Image (spheres, grey):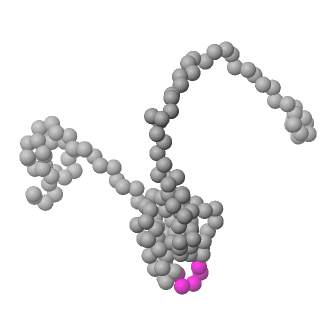
């Protein structure tokens, strides 16, 4: 294959790599770019970053992040939240939090099976909307009238 060219599957002719269609009428499918994750932002969201010895800290933490992404996925690690920041990702890799992470992983991958449940059609709306007047709940609302 010539450099900078791609081959049309229908007519086997070589055309430019950026061409979206061939002269024979074949249209090339566009692929969406993969979503890129900024691992530094992801790490700073989960872990308190120290002021000193950052190089060794990042080496250790990225190794543990690699372990987590192999066990679960990068998408899951990017959205998981514990409500606070840890000192290290070693807490998440440890067996003590493995059960909690596994539970969050199952919730992340949960697929709802609609075939088990009956779907009801309520139909069209009947009647007029009811207008509810706002009552004064405090002194400020009373004085603003």
Residue 79 colored in magenta in the image? no
Q: Position of residue 37 (x, y in %)?
A: 44, 61
Front one among 141 and 42: 42
Left or right: 99 in relation to 115: right
Q: Quadrant of the C terminus?
A: top right
Left or right: 91 in relation to 34: right
Front one among 104 and 25: 104
Q: Is residue 60 above or below residue 11?
A: below
| Quarter holding residue 132 | top right
Farthest-out residue, top: 127
Q: Position of residue 91 (x, y in %)?
A: 56, 73
Q: Is residue 37 visible?
A: no
Front one among 131 and 72: 72
Left or right: 66 in relation to 46: left
Residue occupying the point 48% across, 79% down: 60
Residue occupying the point 48% across, 82% down: 55
Q: Position of residue 49 (x, y in %)?
A: 57, 75
Front one among 75 and 112: 112
Q: Is residue 113 above or below residue 52?
A: above
Q: Position of residue 121 (x, y in %)?
A: 53, 22
Q: Quadrant of the N terminus?
A: bottom left
Residue occupying the point 10% across, 58% down: 2
Farthest-out residue, front: 116
Residue range (magenta): 47-54
Residue occupying the point 68% across, 16% down: 128
Q: Is residue 58 visible?
A: yes
């Amino acid at each position: 294959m010539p450099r900078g060219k791609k081959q049309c599957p229908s007519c086997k002719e070589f055309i430019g790599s950026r061409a979206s269609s061939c002269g024979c009428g074949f249209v090339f499918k566009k692929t969406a770019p993969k979503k890129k994750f900024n691992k530094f932002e992801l790490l700073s969201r989960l872990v308190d970053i120290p002021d000193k010895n950052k190089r060794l800290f990042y080496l250790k933490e990225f190794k543990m992040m690699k372990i987590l992404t192999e066990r679960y996925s990068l998408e899951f690690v990017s959205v998981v939240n514990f409500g606070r920041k840890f000192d290290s990702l070693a807490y998440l890799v440890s067996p003590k939090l493995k059960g909690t992470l596994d539970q969050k992983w199952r919730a992340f991958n949960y697929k709802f099976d609609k075939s088990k449940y009956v779907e009801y059609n309520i139909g069209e709306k009947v009647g007029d909307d009811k207008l509810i007047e706002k009552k004064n709940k405090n002194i400020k609302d009373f004085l603003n009238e």
